[in-house]
Image (cartoon, coloured by chain):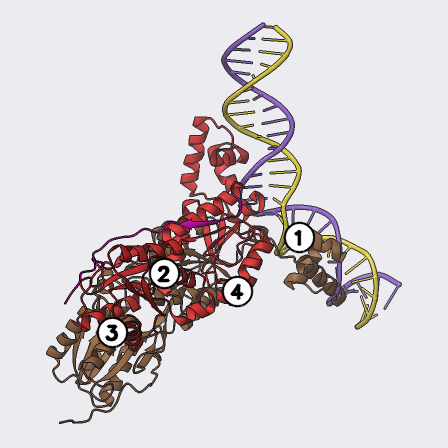
Chain colours: A brown, B red, C purple, D yellow
Amino acid sequence: MANIHDVARVAGVSISTVSYALSGKRSIAASTKQRIDDAVLELDYRANAGARMLKGARTQILALSAPLHAGTHAPAHMTFVLSVVTAARKYDYDVLLLTQDEATSGLRRVVRSSLVDGIVLLDVSTSDPRTDLVRELGLPATVIGIPDDTDGLTCVDLDFERAAELAVRRLVDLGHREIGLIGQAPLVYERGSNFPPRFRDAFLAEATRLGATVGFTPAPEESAGVRAALDGLSATLPGMTGLVLHCNEPVQSMVLDLLSQRGVSVPNDLSVISACSSFSTDHLNPPLDVIPLPADLSCTRAIELTMAQFAGDVEPHVEYIDPTYVELGSTAPLTSRP
Amino acid sequence: MANIHDVARVAGVSISTVSYALSGKRSIAASTKQRIDDAVLELDYRANAGARMLKGARTQILALSAPLHAGTHAPAHMTFVLSVVTAARKYDYDVLLLTQDEATSGLRRVVRSSLVDGIVLLDVSTSDPRTDLVRELGLPATVIGIPDDTDGLTCVDLDFERAAELAVRRLVDLGHREIGLIGQAPLVYERGSNFPPRFRDAFLAEATRLGATVGFTPAPEESAGVRAALDGLSATLPGMTGLVLHCNEPVQSMVLDLLSQRGVSVPNDLSVISACSSFSTDHLNPPLDVIPLPADLSCTRAIELTMAQFAGDVEPHVEYIDPTYVELGSTAPLTSRP
DNA sequence: GGATGCTGTCGAAACGTTTCGATAGTGCCG
DNA sequence: CGGCACTATCGAAACGTTTCGACAGCATCC
């Protein structure tokens, strides 16, 4: 494989000139630069990663800790992983993927061996051993999600509280006063994921503040459970005219199926909102008003924050991404009906 | 961060002694080895990855090209990705994740810069530009999936043909003669994924050979389509008593839901088999007999094969993983009924 | 016309490791 | 006891890059 000496020889200059020409850190005569570029192209030269790491102190690699917990919706998870990779590439960074069983030991290993310049943590729980480790390692790091103790951490996440408020307000503005919420799977609450309770609590609080009655049920595991969950909500709220789904896609479509089977028309009989969905609701029937969980935004911002930490121009802090409301026709004003 | 000089100093030996003690490539006195190990522990020393790469010619990193195509079932995909990482770690390899938009350019980049020792390709289509690139780059590589042209490639995959035969034979052995097959989404066939047609064609061939009548329909996109698909099959095969699902999990559960709604009992009225599912069918109702698509086996084997290529003791070849049949009670002998 | 500054280029050191070849010490054999 | 084999250790070269300091050439300025 061609190295910098080969390029220097072909271009008829010294290796330091080549290095400066490629990095742009010193001015180089246009004609010289041209010859070097030609040589690079001809030899298909790319700087040896090991040598660059060794000397340059920059590895151009980020560690991505992406454990796949039971109960986490895999497609959503995958979307985050891919978004991180894509965002990192914009800054010429590659991504090393670390998993579950290596959660802390793997992070420690790659950091101690100077294999990575920074860390991105995915799917953190309220109290996550990885956050302590990140503090200890002292490497630039960004957490996607908000753990309980954010001290010394740079975190970014959708503002789930405001998303919940947005959903409630929308329904209340339309006149609805009895509103149901189908949440995540029970497992997810138990495991200590941070966002489901954040959403739920803000939802209940805002509803109470606005004088609406609410019912909550976690997401069922299978279709039989969907029936039970809906029945449960109806029992609590006989006059329920609004429903918010903070659950994964399969559950959403099962709920819609069941409603249509029962002759409940959306939005005429029931206004439904999909909250914090990683996926578009276009293909659902009907398409649901949605407050998207924008994986690409979170991840792009996370990478930006990590890069800013390299530059040293950012202090540890928590950053919330503003939720938006997308109207697709699954909500309607409350009308009194026979 | 501590380096090998620090360890040598603390242990009171030269750096080459440290290196040999740690690599085990030359014999070291037990007492010396002990002092070195102590020093390593005390300093939390780990060899600098860049230096190791530069000198050692081994980077201990694999590139994983994992594009997420539309129509690919994300959870299954995620399972493969994580399985590759887990398997690679067993050999002390880390995994660099490459995506979609960098499919070929990214591979070329990491290889040309000697950042990775080998390549694993996921989700290859019948004619995939990445396979040509792999041939060109000449680095150890393993393909999970079977492209049309396997020349010079090391490939591993479930033996979909035998899996299809297994499914057919099971049903025919039980006396069923009219058998339906619900396949993957149309998109998946169009895009040129290799395994869906492999399964379908072998399925049809084996059924024909055994004298069974078959009907085939691709997987629908949503629940409305499931109805249509089932109705279509019933129209083709009015006496259908066996059904094979070669489709993703959501479709499987939608099919079961619909069957139960229609009062079709599994397995009394209809014997159902889940073919090549990446996930357990335990939670389905009823749990389905399954021919698992063992992501961990494929990925473990892929990593083994890549390691064998490093050692130079394996020639390019295609390797099939034997399917197994897991009985969970969703098939029953055909009984004549009123 | 000598001092000053700027531009473009070069040589050499340094990064941390692995590994080759050398060597000192020890035990054994003839 | 000289020679040999073997063990344990060391010194130094090499991997390919980045970057510091040097310097030649040239223009500019009092």
Q: Amino acid at mark 1?
A: Ala
Q: Nearer the viewer, mark 3 or mark 4?
A: 3
**For the residue carrying disc 2, how many other residues have a C-alpha within 10 Å: few (<14), some (14-19), or many (20+)?**
few
Estimate the spatial distance between the alpha carbons at disc 4 and disc 1, rounded to whole Å. Answer: 23 Å
Mark with earlier residue (3, 1): 1
What distance separates the C-alpha of mark 2 from that of mark 4? 43 Å
Q: Which mark is residue B102?
A: 4
Q: Chain of mark 3?
A: A
Which residue does the image show at 40% across and 39% down from the upper left? B41
D4 or A329: nearer the viewer? A329
Measure the C-alpha gap from mark 3 to mark 4: 36 Å
- Mark 3, Cα crowd under 10 Å, few <14 / some 14-19 / many 20+, is many
Q: Main secondary structure of the magenta part?
A: loop
Q: Which residues are magenta?
A: B315-338
> Circle 1 sits on which residue?
A2
Q: Nearer the viewer, mark 2 or mark 3?
A: 2
Answer few, some or many: residues within 10 Å of disc 4's Cα (few below 14, many 20 plus, some between 14 and 19): some
